[in-house]
Image: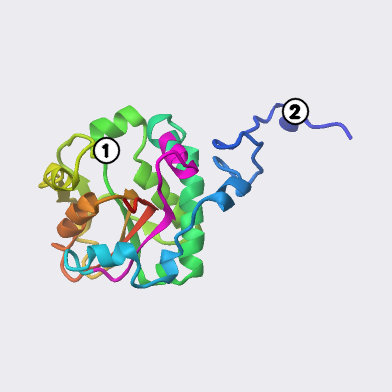
Amino acid sequence: MALGAAEVFAPVAYCAECGAALNSSEVGVCRLCLDRLPVTSFEAWPQNPVKTRMDGRILLVSAFSCYYFHKGETLRRLIHQFKYSGNRNVATDLGREMGRRASAAGFTDNYDALIPVPLHWRREWRRGYNQSLVIARGIAEVTGLQVMTDVLLRRRAAPTQTHLNAEQRHLNVRNVFSLGRGAQRAKGMRLLLVDDVFTTGATSEACLEKLLEIEGVKLGLATLGYASS
């Protein structure tokens, strides 16, 4: 049977990890590569390492990371794809998978809205997008939760956290975040902060401390990766 013009000229997308052609439901990573990622199952484990590491610092409803993050492994390569190579579609597929796992475990039932960790406008302009926002939108596609981008803002730039130790990371993000005009609408809501990788928790803590200034909020944390050490 002859192919139509749209089928002949339709661009084919390929998996950022293995190079296989993607199907219509995939935009950045194929199902096979997603299934090979090292899941944590923290979404079904109330006292998981993310939650316990945040206990005593910030009172959270719940917290989880979707995958273990190790140097040299697949997740690290995929994160580099969307943070440094402009492949935002990878973040979309990973966000959708986060949403599927969190929803299946009932984790997202506890929340009203997603709050992506904001980037400074200069860094977002250079990258072309905020990767945490792309992940959050992927989660939202699956869960139906709204994404609120005007609640938490980054008011000043800070050096990358990548090569800093734990103490330096906390100092680096001190007084970086502020509340936006959407904070008024967020009063009394259950907000889930979304970020890419949990390492020391410094950025998450700085964001959550600022969100706690909103009257009556309850807070949670969801990150794509968990760097255990």
Residue at position x 10%, y 47% in the image:
175
Q: How is the image coloured?
A: rainbow
Q: Position of residue 89 (x, y in %)?
A: 50, 39
Measure the C-alpha gap from mark 2 to mark 1: 44 Å
Q: Position of residue 167 (x, y in %)?
A: 13, 47
Does the CB distance between marks 2 and 1 fall below 8 Å?
Answer: no
Look at mark 1 in the image and give the residue it sits on. Answer: 162
Q: Position of residue 26 (x, y in %)?
A: 59, 45
Side (left or right) of 142 relative to 170: right
Side (left or right) of 36 relative to 190: right
Of labels 2 and 1, the one closer to you = 1
Residue at position x 21%, y 66% in the image:
187
Looking at the rendering, the stretch of residues picked out in magenta corresponds to 60-80
Q: Which mark is residue 8?
A: 2
- Reply yes or no: does residue 53 show up in magenta: no
Q: Position of residue 221 (x, y in %)?
A: 31, 60
Regarding mark 1 in the picture, which secondary structure is present there? loop
Q: Nearer the viewer, residue 165 or 216?
A: 165
Side (left or right) of 62 relative to 97: left
Q: Amino acid at mark 1?
A: Thr
Q: Amino acid at mark 2?
A: Val
Q: Height in image: 24 above or below 101?
A: above
Q: Nearer the viewer, residue 202 or 206?
A: 202
Residue 115 falls in which quadrant of the image? Answer: bottom left
